Amino acid sequence: MKTPPKYPQKKHWERLKEVDSQGLEPEEFLRRWRVTHADLAKICHVSKVTVDRWFSQGNDRRTPRAEHKSRLFYIHREWIRVSFEEM
């Protein structure tokens, strides 16, 4: 018997805020996963040039936006989950 979908409760919305506020810096993502700047660009839906600027030291350095850090956090978590499923 299939159970009907549940209505989100306050605790669900609070958890959503927590997840949205979490992020993973690109440098940290690279320490955990062997990916290239091109791979990071694909994951974050940005150009490779943008990713290169996140890592540059000059005047053209850019800071990744919160949405990019959140995406890296989400992908990191999903990749860990997939890794454990393979065991």
Image (cartoon, rainbow, N blue to C red):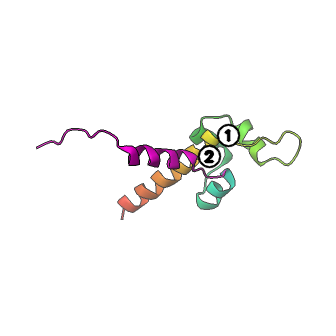
Tell which residue pokes out farthest to the left in this image.
1
Where is residue 2, by image quadrant? top left
Where is residue 31, by image quadrant? bottom right
**Start and end of the magenta stretch?**
1-25
Whether 76 is drawn above or below 47: the answer is: below
How crowded pointer 2 is (Cα within 10 Å; few <14, some 14-19, many 20+) is rated as many
Is the C-beta separation of discs 2 and 1 under 8 Å? Answer: yes
Query: Which image quadrant: the C terminus?
Result: bottom left
Residue at numbered disc 2: 69
Residue 32 screen position, x and y as percent: 59, 60
Q: Secondary structure at mark 1?
A: loop
The kind of residue tagged 2 is: Lys
Label 2, label 1: how far apart the Cα atoms are: 7 Å
Is 54 positioned to the left or the right of 78 in the image? right
Residue at numbered disc 1: 65
* Most foreground residue, 27 or 23: 23
Residue 15 screen position, x and y as percent: 45, 49
Which residue is depicted at the point 51% across and 45% down? 17
How crowded pointer 1 is (Cα within 10 Å; few <14, some 14-19, many 20+) is rated as few
The kind of residue tagged 1 is: Arg
Q: Secondary structure at mark 2?
A: helix
Query: Which image quadrant: the N terminus?
Result: top left
